[in-house]
Image (cartoon, rainbow, N blue to C red):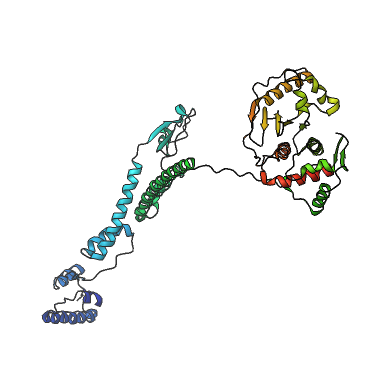
Amino acid sequence: MGVTTSNRKRSEECMSVNHNHNPNHTIASQSSDCRRKRLKFSSESTRIVSASYAVVSRVSRYPDIKPPFVREVHAPCRPKKLDLARNLSSFADYIGGDIMGNFLVRNYEKAKRAALGEYRLVSQREKVVIDLDEESGGREVSDDSDVMEVIQVDDSEGKVDGLEAKAKVVEIGVQRRSTSSPDSALTNAIVNLEEHDLSSVRVYKKLLEGVQRRTDTIQSLNFQIELNEKRRDTFQLLRPKKELVEEVPFEPFVPLTDDEDHEVSRAFSSNRKKILVAHESSNIELSGEKIRCLLPGAWLNDEVINLYLELLKERERREPKKFLKCHFFNTFFYKKLISGRDGYDYKSVRRWTSQRKLGYNLFDCDKIFVPIHQEIHWCLAVINKKDAKFQYLDSLKGKDNRVLKVLARYFVDEVKDKTGKDIDVSTWEKEFVDDLPEQENGFDCGVFMIKYADFYSRGLGLCFDQEHMSYFRRRTAKEVLRLRAD
């Protein structure tokens, strides 16, 4: 007799065990197992019956197989290793009210929604479509605008698909934004966040807001700087200007050496009739008596003044680049010029300035110095061609209009006689110099006069005063004794 058995594994029986531990059910299952074993071992001695009859007859004897009982799990389970973004929503539903899990999922979803929202705002901006064939004639497109460049494709050759034949649209907008400003740079970063970390959108947004705040602060500071600069300029205009102190040159005040000082002292104490120095070109001789006029308290005589002026002219010839080109009339010129009946006589001095006698043209000089003797007082007049002026210098601040008028008339006649040209000096300024060193006694006027000529011929300002007169007297004595003006 044939028997059909079921070789179920032990593990399936264990999995189908009811956890209620019913004792009747356990005994029934054990008796069923013993019966199956006896049928298995006695199958060889039974005769074979029909297969269909055996299956039907034997299966009907056994109870229906129940599916295994599903065990309830009351602990968190590890999710399958699939895509995190695909399973986080199901994971959130699975963990239900778990606080920690919902917190992580909520943060992720919130960051994702914020990033996608920013991207949609940028993508939905107005787009300007430009036909390059029609508007390519010199028009430029700003890199800071959202632009779609349309390129027309010719499909007559049949080399492109239908989609390619319509138009190739290239978005320039955000991708071609100028990166020269912080706003455009941060906007580029926000657009590209989908390819990177979407959770950092807020960080970039905060950076953008910070840049905008700093821009406002910088503009405010620039305004304050401009305001303070205007205030400073206003205060500088109201502040009294400081007078520039002219630097005193050293050369006109070089102290005398011991030898030079002894030489001057010996000359002052020498014999009155002894000729101490003779100047050949001017035929001027100085005796002991004449040179004593340079002692303190004495009036300067014509010989010392004329010899010193000749030495100034020789100094200019030695060093023409260092000194102005000047001419120095002697003390007799002005007296001769005004010796006529009407107080003017050009013919009496016409030959004083011939080319043969001077070696140069008088009208080529920058300055012409004329000593003026006012009975008992020495002054200086200057024909200043360089500055177009007639100047009068008096150490006692005196003024004499007649002197300047005579010299103006003389200069016109001199130029007419020597060059044949008529010049107009009516526009020249007649100046009585006020800003000059003043005399504080009754005997130093001659020294002031020759020092005016000395400093003007150097191109210097009159940077001396009364206290220098004793030094200038001894220095002038030294220079005339050695026939050389320094």
Q: Is residue 21 visible?
A: yes
The percent position of residue 90, horizontal first and vertical second, equals: 25, 59
- Image point (37%, 49%), residue name: 213
Residue 343, placed above or below residue 476: above
Q: Is residue 7 visible?
A: no
> Residue 316, position in %: x, y?
79, 37
Which quadrant of the view contains residue 482?
top right
Q: Which residue is outermost to the left?
A: 24
Number of numbered discs present? 0
Q: Quadrant of the C terminus?
A: top right
The quarter holding residue 172 reads: top left
Between 381 and 165, the residue placed more toward the observer is 381
Relative horizontal placement of residue 178, taking residue 426 as reference (left or right):
left
Q: Quadrant of the N terminus?
A: bottom left
Question: Is residue 363 found left or right of 106 in the rendered image?
Answer: right
Residue 49 placed where, x, y %?
20, 72
Q: Position of residue 466 (x, y in %)?
A: 67, 44
Left or right: residue 273 versus residue 436 is: right
Query: Depth check: 296 or 58 in front?
Result: 296
- Residue 479 is drawn in which quadrant? top right
Q: Nearer the viewer, residue 90 or 277?
A: 277
Q: Is residue 418 above or below residue 257?
A: above
